[in-house]
Amino acid sequence: MIRFSVFYPAAEGATFDHDYYRNKHVPLCVKTWGLDGAEIDKGVDGPYVAAVHFKFESLEALEAARGSAGMADILADIPNYTSIPPILQTSELVD
Amino acid sequence: MIRFSVFYPAAEGATFDHDYYRNKHVPLCVKTWGLDGAEIDKGVDGPYVAAVHFKFESLEALEAARGSAGMADILADIPNYTSIPPILQTSELVD
């Protein structure tokens, strides 16, 4: 299994709308990519104000999702909830 | 629920023993803190070579774990698998 994580680092003056992220943006990703769900983090302490973790069956499935037609809508939606450039991480889930 | 994540950023010359981490260090944390398990990430692409995610019932439970007597053994074990100073993140899991 592959974990695709997106992190939003805290920055001076940065904004992040947690409600929009939870109710609109992440559901859009889940629907576009045909996933069962995602895990959303709201930062309490540490470098990130928010994060999300998606699980994919394989790297190929992740690549297909990131290359899908709906990706343009996902990217265009980012300014609706944050001014923070996201950091992307792809990892294998270790058993 | 609280997620406590530990990230190991890639760095020039840094070492990370994924087998030791999976088989010795994370199990030590899980046992010391009385958890059911943890999710381990092996980096494929992005800033981190490895990460782990622990879930706690509350911030108080996390604080108790981090203040427990076994913490010294956990910290002392870090040089056995990596030269990378870890980055710590505490988050609320959003429903």
Image (spheres, coloured by chain):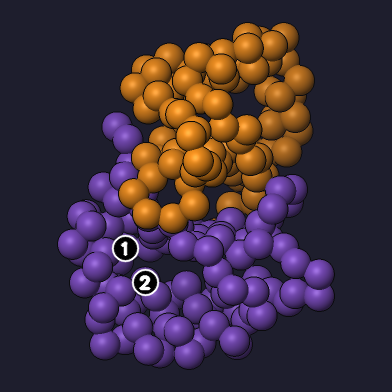
Chain colours: A orange, B purple
**Closer to the camera, A11 or A78?**
A11
Q: Label 2: chain?
A: B
**Closer to the camera, B6 or A1?**
B6
> Residue at left 23%, top 57%?
B59
The numbered mark, 1 or 2, whose residue comes first in the sequence reads 2
Q: Label 1: chain?
A: B
Image quadrant assignment for residue B81: bottom right
Image vertical order of residue A2 relative to residue A20, above or below: below
Q: Position of residue B80 (x, y in %)?
A: 60, 87
Q: Is residue B17 left or right of residue A83?
A: right
Mark 1 and mark 2 in contact? Answer it, CB < 8 Å. Answer: yes
The quadrant the C terminus of chain B occupies is top left
Residue furthest front as drawn: A13
Circle 1: residue type = Asp
> Residue at left 24%, top 68%?
B63
Q: Is residue A17 visible?
A: yes
Image vertical order of residue B41 relative to residue B20, above or below: above
Circle 2: residue type = Val
> Residue at left 73%, top 38%?
A59
**Closer to the camera, A59 or B8?**
B8
- Element on which disc 1 rests: loop
Q: Position of residue A42 (x, y in %)?
A: 37, 40
Pointer 2 local density, CA inside 10 Å: few below 14, some 14–19, many at least 20: some
Q: Which residue is mark 1?
A: B36
Image vertical order of residue B71 relative to residue A4, above or below: below
Q: Label 1 vs label 2: CA separation?
A: 7 Å
Q: Which residue is mark 2?
A: B30
Q: Position of residue A77 (x, y in %)?
A: 56, 13
Image quadrant assignment for residue A71: top right
Pointer 1 local density, CA inside 10 Å: few below 14, some 14–19, many at least 20: few
Q: Is residue A55 visible?
A: no
